[in-house]
């Protein structure tokens, strides 16, 4: 298949923020495989991203309230555990998926600009026999270009959603946990990727 595929391992949602640094890590991970077709028609990918967001960013207030109720001596360890084992992995996975689709869109666009379309093998029809073959080729090319433009818009929208969610989530976590210096470089790397 042109463009390959991406397989990500998704940790099962955690039942709580953990009773300590070890937390509840017994749940099995799930593997999700995404291919180019999924990026062209992203409804399943959108469902996947929505589910990941629902189990991490959408429950940040609940999780940080749980953290606030922890004994003061455990707060730091619980905050580090929550950010390191829940938020950052989910953000990384979502970023991988969005970046994969961005790469697929770029590859398709490059192929179209070179005059090719890897999903279509030109018909061996003489234009004198079928004078519409050139028109059909142009229509296919326009349709593929339309797909690429939709993919690029989808990627831009998803990156903006991630930027907003991550900024809001970090603000809430920082209000409870303070600045978590251990994760500053990882958060900065995610921020840099979002802005590209």
Image (tube, rainbow, N blue to C red):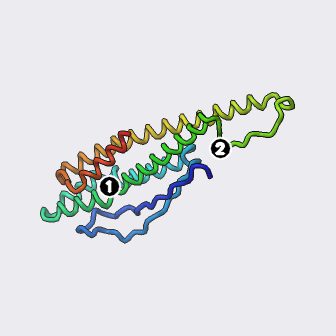
In the picture, the disc for residue 72 is none
Image coords of residue 184 (percent x, y): 24, 51
Q: Secondary structure at mark 2?
A: loop
Q: Position of residue 35 (x, y in %)?
A: 56, 52
Q: Residue furthest left?
A: 72
Q: In the rendered view, would you say 40 is above or below 30?
A: above
Q: Residue 26 versus residue 155: which sits nearer the camera?
A: 155
Q: Quadrant of residue 134?
A: top right
Image position of 27 (left or right of 167):
right
Crowdedness near tag 2: few (<14), some (14–19) or many (≥20) residues, C-alpha within 10 Å:
few
Closer to the camera: disc 1 or disc 2? Answer: 2
Q: Looking at the image, is mark 1 or mark 2 earlier in the sequence?
A: 1
Q: Position of residue 132 (x, y in %)?
A: 79, 29
Residue that label 1 marks: 87
Specify the quadrant that holds the C terminus. Answer: top left
Which residue was labeled with disc 2?
A: 118
Q: Is residue 176 left or right of residue 113?
A: left
- Residue at point 18% right, 57% down? 68
Residue under the image location 65 percent in, 44 percent down:
118
Q: Is residue 191 left or right of residue 69?
A: right
Front in this rendered view, residue 73 or 149? 149
Residue at 27 percent of width and 70 percent of height: 22
SS of the residue under disc 1: helix
Identify which residue is drawn at 53% across, 57% down. Answer: 33
């Amino acid at each position: 298949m042109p463009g390959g595929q991406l397989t990500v391992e998704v940790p099962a949602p955690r039942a709580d923020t953990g009773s300590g640094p070890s937390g509840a890590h017994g749940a099995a991970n799930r593997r999700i495989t995404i291919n180019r077709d999924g990026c062209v028609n992203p409804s399943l990918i959108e469902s996947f991203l929505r589910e990941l967001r629902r189990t991490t960013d959408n429950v940040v207030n609940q999780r940080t309230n749980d953290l606030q109720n922890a004994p003061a001596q455990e707060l730091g360890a619980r905050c580090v555990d929550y950010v390191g084992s829940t938020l950052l992995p989910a953000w990384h996975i979502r970023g991988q998926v969005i970046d994969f689709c961005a790469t697929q869109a770029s590859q398709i666009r490059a192929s179209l600009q070179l005059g090719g379309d890897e999903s279509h093998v030109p018909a061996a029809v003489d234009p004198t026999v079928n004078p519409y073959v050139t028109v059909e080729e142009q229509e296919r090319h326009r349709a593929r270009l339309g797909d690429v433009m939709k993919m690029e818009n989808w990627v831009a929208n998803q990156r903006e959603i991630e930027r907003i969610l991550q900024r809001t989530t970090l603000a809430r976590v920082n209000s409870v946990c303070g600045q978590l210096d251990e994760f500053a470089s990882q958060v900065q790397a995610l921020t840099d990727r979002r802005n590209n």
